[in-house]
Amino acid sequence: MPKLPLEIKELTVGQLSERSGVAVSALHFYEAKGLITSRRTAGNQRRYSRDTLRQVAVIRVAQRVGIPLRVVAEALETLPEGRTPTPEDWARLSTEWRAELDARIDQLVRLRDRLSDCIGCGCLSLDRCALRNLDDRLGDVGPGPRRLLSRRIAQEDHYTSS
């Protein structure tokens, strides 16, 4: 799609999709989750402010590095409505996400190093397996693969499920 003329202040969902490279269904999903907003025309068609392009870009970058959409939504809520996120906004958001990313990187490195002798869950390395959960002891901590979840996500899951 060619560059949108600057005088176009609102985009249709198709224009936003084409310009951002994000599927229309994903944009509808983002809107349903409160990540982006639109107004409705008299004919009930969605119209997005031009600033939504930057918001979608932030969402996609965050997703790409593994930030959960819930965390992205919380971050976007801190931005004043009606304006494009600035470089300062991005610096603040990325700084806030850095600890989460560092924890995920650490977790992946530990998982990679521990799985190097794993043959695949048959499990021929059961006495050394980092994923082993003898007698389902981790079931008391919460659902899911507790040892694979980052500490922050595991703690948040624990508090929200209580």
Image (cartoon, helix red, strand yellow):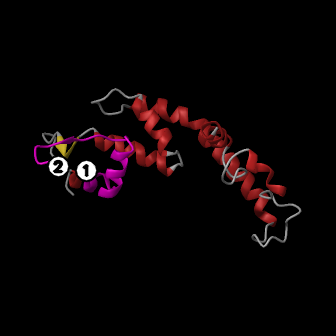
Which x, y percent locates residue 109? 71, 52
- In the image, residue 84 sits, relative to residue 24, either above or below, namely above
Which x, y percent locates residue 19? 26, 52
| Three-letter code for the amino acid on which mark 2 is drawn | Gln
Q: Magenta segment range?
A: 16-45
Which x, y percent locates residue 10? 18, 42
Along the line of sight, the residue nearer the viewer: 141 or 103? 141
Which x, y percent locates residue 2? 19, 55
Q: What label does residue 16 carry, if any?
A: 1
At 14% from the left and 42% from the top, the residue drawn is 8
Along the line of sight, the residue nearer the viewer: 54 or 29? 29
Element marked by disc 2: loop
Q: Does residue 23 appear in the picture of this structure?
A: no
- In the image, residue 57 sits, relative to residue 130, either above or below, namely above
Along the line of sight, the residue nearer the viewer: 96 or 150? 150
How many neighbours does mark 1 have within 10 angstroms: few (below 14), some (14-19), or many (20 or more)? many
Tell me the distance, in whole angstroms, between the alpha carbons under discs 1 and 2. 13 Å
Q: What label does residue 45 carry, if any?
A: 2
Quadrant for the C terminus, please. Answer: top right
